Image: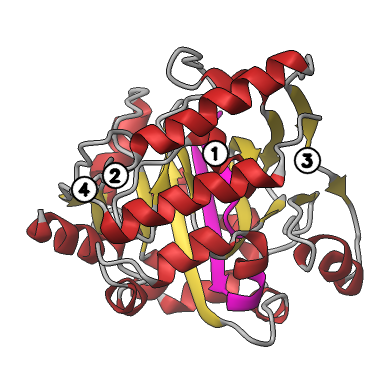
Amino acid sequence: MTRIKDKYIFEYQFWRLADHFWGNKTPSNRFENKRKDISSTLHSEFKNTKAKGSLRKVDRVKNISDYDLKKKYINKGIPVVLEGKAKGWVCVKKWTMGWLYKNYCDDKVSLFDATNTEDINFDVEETTLKDVLDAMKFNDSSKYIRFNRILYEHPELINDFDWKWLYRMRNKISSGKTFQVFIGGKGSRTTLHSASEHNLFTQVYGKKHWYLYPPENDVILNPPINRSPYFYSKYDPDNPDFDTYPNAKFLQTWECELRAGDVLFNPPSWWHQVTNLDNSIGVGFRWFSPLDSFKSSFTQTLLTIMSSNPPIWTAAKNRTNFAQIFKYMKEQK
């Protein structure tokens, strides 16, 4: 395991915060050279100590008690796959692409992806669920439904999940009970990003592959500073660019594959890149716990609270409607 010394993390995050508060533009690069100097020093130290990258499988557990889940994983901010946890849930037994087509094909959906370029594209395409499902039949992975509102447009469907258990897993001091649905074809993906919320992600249908990285790797992944509560990196673990990210070869990469009925706990501020291995339906359940989030990444949580693009109150108000958030951000450009 390659450990990053605390002094490098502190120095990097100091200049990251400086760019957030006193930077010149969006993304801000006023103090970019300071961050590059830290990266260069870190690279030399890694080489001198003959550090190596590694691959670690996310723990897979069965029949873990709620007490142990919170004690060993949620409270410590460690990812874990609850293997088969949702196998008996109605959503896993009933939800398929055919079922969606039969019952909800005329539903309006919004398509967007703001994670893959520095010149962020906040365009929102309005279409129907039928259009997306038809594209998937022809292996067209370009239409990927993210943060879908089907559970809010059809609230009776929440009963297809063990929502009482999901609610129990939230911290006592927390806000939000947000369901977000992802529907995509084989090969569709969301590039590397992170957020300051907890996420219990249920794989309802199909399979997903996940890469995950702990928050201290900000110094290696070097996210653009865009004053947003949504964080992303241009580093691609499937196609690594070691010229731009020279320290990425020393990363400890966590990895897992979710199958229908699995539930993944994704802790606050953990970086993750997700690829659909099959036609896939997944549902995230998110909540924000300030204490856990600050413990996981003080800097990212502070940047989230102090965001202006959009302001945190705008993001919180529209936490179940990402299309509105992206439209707001486009208007501010």
> Three-letter amino acid code at disc 1?
Val
Q: Which residue is mark 2?
A: 114
Q: Residue at x 37, y 23 (%)?
A: 139
10 Å crowding of disc 2: few (<14), some (14-19), many (20+) = some
Nearer to us of marks 3 and 4 is 4
Q: How far separated are the C-alphas under marks 2 and 1?
A: 22 Å
Asked whether residue 238 is in view, the answer is: yes
> Three-letter amino acid code at disc 2?
Ala
Q: Quadrant where the N terminus lies?
A: top right
Q: Position of residue 210 (x, y in %)?
A: 61, 36
Disc ID at residue 219: 1
Identify the mark nearer the N-term, 4 or 1. 4
Q: Residue at x 45, y 62 (%)?
A: 180
Relative depth, front residue between 87 and 17: 17
> Three-letter amino acid code at disc 4?
Thr
Relative depth, front residue between 49 and 222: 49
Q: Residue at x 76, y 54 (%)?
A: 78
Q: Position of residue 218 (x, y in %)?
A: 54, 42
> Three-letter amino acid code at disc 3?
Val
In the picture shown, does residue 223 fall above or below 299?
Answer: above
Numbered circles on residues, count: 4
14 sits left or right of 320 in the view: right
Q: Is residue 271 magenta?
A: yes
Q: Which residue is mark 4?
A: 26
Q: How far separated are the C-alphas under marks 3 and 1?
A: 22 Å
Q: Position of residue 110 (x, y in %)?
A: 24, 54
Secondary element at image label 2:
loop
* Residues in magenta, as a range: 268-292
